[in-house]
């Protein structure tokens, strides 16, 4: 297939002109003709990479900063958090109102947009085929990329949808000895049927019921009696469900990459969920924390082996590349269980890519790029995993997604800019300078805020205002927000000024919310 299909838009008919730095890199970099043999050669390969890689999404958040390692890596975002000042973030100027219903729709609109296609063409050297990565995609995305001559460097959408099922994940995991919380999978119509099967399985009647698909806990139900079951009957009756024993647990998130040589496991982190200061949704995900004693050494090793076995088994299904796993640590017994699989880039990627392991080798997502780079390589997966386990004790990072939690619709008049923030002499959080990402943060005395909604936008209950990234912890050992976290949240909110809309205008903006949710 040609590098670019010239029938689909204003694309170049000759090789683009390289700037002076690119010409110097191209002339100075000797071509590697053998398989990449070690981390040094892998780093060199991506430092001199000519093939453009575009991360496409509503914002650049998930993989922000990866361009520090990968030449040619850049971002195409619907919302430009830097208002045109980030040299590697592109956002189309003409964005008419579209009632988007999903992240997939936003990404498909971006890929089809004439400004985006022209931008990709400008950055694509003659003879190269641009690569596309994203969080959300579907079969329409695949068709768009095929038509335009882009390479979508992700597993097939149909396979990802298949693996998204909690039932499929559970069965695949069981086939390689990866245990879930004691459970059974069934179809029922009444609470009595649930009780009969639960007692037979020795689970008791304090249960957790899940349907096959769901996001951020929206289809996970805690049930202990007939009255509770009745409230969820419409969701769980007549469909396949997973019924689990309810345990005291600590949810742990971890990302990994399945390569042709095995699964590389990233750092483990806790989740920030359900805090009313951050989200209006009970149990809603609002960020992650990474710190040395997320898991003790024994539990970390057990969890790493669990993820590796699951990842290697996914390869038998045809999967390769990046995925995220939720692990459950039973706080009463110390047992580590599989929670669920998310076969995609996740929100945790933001701090996965700034770990000591990332700086010692390469960020975790670079292993994904390596798998799709079209080159032979050799890596000692056991050695990488052992080193990253050891380096896990060196990192303390956190990030919070700050939502509008009030039941109101307001026009944003003033909003804090994206960049670095510090504390002044009175302990107030103040803007220090614009910055491209959070990789240069070095202490708890500073933070990076990535703004999503700015002046001229609207905010409503549940809207993402922005993401704050910082060193240090933001939750206590009991799972409550720390004093520092509350101060950061209050400080960011105080930097916004907004005008409430009259009731007549709220309906119109509520429809608009569908395009930005």
Image (cartoon, helix red, strand yellow):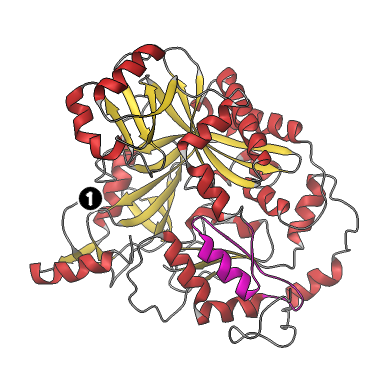
- Horizontal side of residue 482 vs 358, given as left or right: left
Q: Position of residue 500 (x, y in %)?
A: 14, 65
- In percent of the image, x 53 and y 28: which residue is there? 292
Frontmost residue, 341 versus 229: 229
Image quadrant of residue 300? top right
Q: Residue furthest left?
A: 503
- In percent of the image, x 51 and y 66: which residue is there? 140
As for residue 145 lying within the magenta part, the answer is yes
Q: Position of residue 480 (x, y in %)?
A: 31, 31
Q: Position of residue 16 (x, y in %)?
A: 71, 83
- Residue 411 appears in the rendering: no
Image position of 130 with respect to 494: above or below: below
Image position of 515 with respect to 153: above or below: below
Magenta stretch in the rendered image:
124-153
Image quadrant of residue 516? bottom left
Residue located beneath label 1 in the image = 405
């Amino acid at each position: 297939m040609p590098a670019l299909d010239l029938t689909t838009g204003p694309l170049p008919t000759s090789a683009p002109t390289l700037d002076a730095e690119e010409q110097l890199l191209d002339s100075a970099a000797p071509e590697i003709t053998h398989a990449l043999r070690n981390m040094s050669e892998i780093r060199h390969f991506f430092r001199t990479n000519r093939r453009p890689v575009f991360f496409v999404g509503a914002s650049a958040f998930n993989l922000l900063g990866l361009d520090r390692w990968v030449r040619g890596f850049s971002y195409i975002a619907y919302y430009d958090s830097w208002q045109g000042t980030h040299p590697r973030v592109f956002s189309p100027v003409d964005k008419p109102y579209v009632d988007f219903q999903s992240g997939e729709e936003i990404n498909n609109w971006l890929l089809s947009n004439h400004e985006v296609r022209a931008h990709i063409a400008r950055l694509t050297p003659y003879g190269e085929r641009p690569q596309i990565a994203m969080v959300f995609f579907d079969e329409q995305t695949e068709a768009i990329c095929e038509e335009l001559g882009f390479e979508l460097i992700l597993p097939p959408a149909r396979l990802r949808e298949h693996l998204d099922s909690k039932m499929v994940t559970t069965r695949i995991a069981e086939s390689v000895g990866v245990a879930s919380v004691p459970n059974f999978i069934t179809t029922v119509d009444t609470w009595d049927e649930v009780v009969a099967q639960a007692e037979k399985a020795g689970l008791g009647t304090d249960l957790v019921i899940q349907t096959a698909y769901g996001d951020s806990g929206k289809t996970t139900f805690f049930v202990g009696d007939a009255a509770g079951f009745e409230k969820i009957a419409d969701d769980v009756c007549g469909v396949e469900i997973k019924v689990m024993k309810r345990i005291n647990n600590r949810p742990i998130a971890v990302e990994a990459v399945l390569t042709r040589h095995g699964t590389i496991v990233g750092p483990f982190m806790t989740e920030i969920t359900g805090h009313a200061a951050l989200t209006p949704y009970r149990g809603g995900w609002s960020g992650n924390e990474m710190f040395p004693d997320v898991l003790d050494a024994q539990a970390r090793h057990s969890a790493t082996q669990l993820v590796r076995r699951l990842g290697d088994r996914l390869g038998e299904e045809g999967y390769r590349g990046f995925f995220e796993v939720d692990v459950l640590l039973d706080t009463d017994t110390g047992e580590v269980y599989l929670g669920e699989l998310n076969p995609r880039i996740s929100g945790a990627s933001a701090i996965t890519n700034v770990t000591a392991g990332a700086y010692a080798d390469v960020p975790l997502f670079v292993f994904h790029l390596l798998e799709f780079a079209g080159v032979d390589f050799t890596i000692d997966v056991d050695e990488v995993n052992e080193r990253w386990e050891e380096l896990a004790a060196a990192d303390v990072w956190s990030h919070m997604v700050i939502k509008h939690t009030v039941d109101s619709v307001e026009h944003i008049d003033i909003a804090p800019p994206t960049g670095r923030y510090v504390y002044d002499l009175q302990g107030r959080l103040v803007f220090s300078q614009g910055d491209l990402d959070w990789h240069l943060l070095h202490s708890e005395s500073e933070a990076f805020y990535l703004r999503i909604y700015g002046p001229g936008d609207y905010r409503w209950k549940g809207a993402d205002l922005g993401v704050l990234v910082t060193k240090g912890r933001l939750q206590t050992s009991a799972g409550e927000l720390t004093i520092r976290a509350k101060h950061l949240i209050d400080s960011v909110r105080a930097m916004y000024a907004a005008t409430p809309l009259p009731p007549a205008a709220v309906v119109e903006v509520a429809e608009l919310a569908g395009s930005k949710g």
